[in-house]
Image: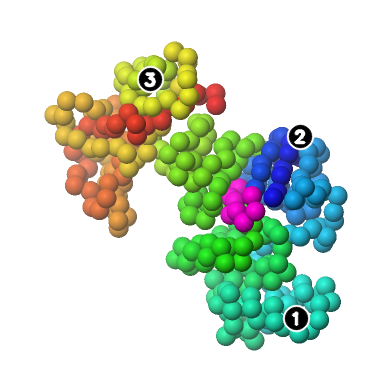
């Protein structure tokens, strides 16, 4: 539905977007994920019409989107701050865009009623934003965005102003609403958990470039570049050289087992990434694994994070286990993993 082709945007010496190309399908929940300053919000503003690219095209259903002013694009943008009118009721806030289009009063009333029912705010139609919780204000902003029935809804860090519990609830709500209203959602976020829980597909940005586009599970389990491996979720990274199909050769630890994502020339610089939950702890007397000592055990309710200091490695190896950890700080252990649970990639990817 939405095709972004070769978009480049520079601000003086800074290149915010560097030849970005993406395709987003009808009814898809698509996330633009990356650290602050990576270009994801600039791309959102170009789609919305608030920025003009230096080069490239954006088409919606084959029509040139860049040729249309912002108010003529079938797009709604939900701001991070929600930008609600404090002096208007919930119903008036939601109706504002429809009234500006001079739609019949009865149609406005009907559509506002329907969308407030959808977001569960019918009982709050007469209240003002100051009388609502953060989660309720977020729903008002969402209702105002979808009441105009846009082809595309852009969301800029939509949940960042909410506390953790409300944010988790609203993630489920956003997903439900997106399926219910059938609108294509494009969300900008730097929160990996948010992107993973919401999106059908995720584009990971770094320094104005797209590093990988994939479904959440594939992105997590098969990162295709060192940046994605390090940025998306916790990971244990080991540097070395490609050693064929068996793993990588490390100066400090010898041969480390892993599975290459692509054919790598023997001896080429390579990186092995293994997730904390894929690592197994064994006793010091076990016949394989890297020797180390437990630095710290942190309990997070359903899972424990165990930091293991391994001689020859700058950073501790992070191990995740279900429930409470069964080891204590100072314990001598070995850390090991299966070859199929670790991925190997080229360092210059």
Number of marks drawn: 3
Along the polypeptide, which appears first: circle 3 or circle 1? 1
The C terminus sits in image quarter: top right
Question: What's the mark number on residue 107?
Answer: 1
Query: Eyeballing the image, is 236 above or below 99?
Result: above
- Span of residues in magenta: 25-33
The alpha-carbon separation of the residues under discs 1 and 2 comes to 50 Å
Q: Nearer the viewer, residue 99 or 90?
A: 99
Q: Which residue ends up furthest to the left in the rendered image? A: 285
Name the residue tied to disc 2: 13
Front tag of 3 and 1? 1
Image mark for residue 245: 3
Disc 2 to disc 3, how far (Cα)?
Answer: 43 Å
Query: How far is the residue under mark 3 from the one under mark 1?
Result: 64 Å
**Left or right, residue 323 beside residue 16:** left
Tell which circle, 1 or 2, labels the residue nearer the N-terminal end.
2
Q: Kindly identify which numbered label has been placed on residue 169.
A: none
Q: Earlier in the sequence, mark 2 or mark 3?
A: 2
């Amino acid at each position: 539905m939405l095709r972004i082709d070769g978009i480049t945007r520079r601000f003086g010496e800074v290149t915010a977007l560097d030849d970005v190309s993406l395709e987003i399908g009808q009814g898809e929940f698509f996330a633009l994920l990356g650290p602050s300053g990576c270009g994801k919000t600039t791309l959102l503003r170009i789609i919305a019409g608030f920025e003009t690219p230096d080069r490239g095209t954006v088409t919606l259903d084959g029509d040139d989107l860049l040729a249309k002013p912002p108010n003529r694009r079938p797009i709604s943008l939900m701001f991070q701050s929600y930008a609600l009118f404090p002096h208007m009721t919930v119903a008036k806030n939601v109706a504002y865009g429809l009234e500006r289009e001079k739609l019949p009063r009865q149609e406005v009333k009907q559509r506002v009623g329907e969308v407030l029912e959808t977001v569960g705010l019918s009982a709050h139609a007469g209240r003002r934003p100051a009388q609502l919780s953060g989660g309720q204000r977020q729903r008002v902003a969402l209702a105002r965005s979808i009441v105009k029935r846009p082809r595309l809804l852009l969301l800029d860090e939509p949940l960042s102003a909410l506390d953790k519990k409300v944010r988790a609830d609203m993630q489920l709500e956003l997903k439900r609403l997106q399926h219910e209203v059938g609108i294509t959602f494009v969300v900008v976020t730097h929160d990996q958990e948010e992107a993973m829980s919401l999106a059908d597909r995720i584009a990971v940005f770094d320094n104005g470039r797209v590093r990988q586009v994939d479904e959440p599970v594939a992105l997590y389990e098969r990162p295709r570049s060192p940046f994605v491996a390090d940025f998306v979720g916790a990971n244990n990274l080991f540097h070395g050289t490609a050693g064929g199909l068996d793993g990588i050769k490390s100066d400090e630890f010898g041969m480390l087992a892993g599975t290459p994502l692509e054919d790598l020339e023997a001896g080429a610089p390579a990186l092995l990434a293994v997730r904390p939950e894929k690592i197994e702890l064994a006793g010091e007397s076990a016949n394989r694994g890297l020797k180390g000592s437990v630095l710290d055990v942190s309990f997070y309710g359903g899972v424990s994070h165990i930091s293991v200091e391994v001689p020859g490695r700058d950073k501790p190896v992070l191990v995740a286990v279900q429930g409470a950890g069964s080891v204590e700080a100072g314990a001598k252990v070995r850390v090991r993993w299966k070859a199929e649970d670790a991925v190997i990639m080229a360092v210059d990817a």
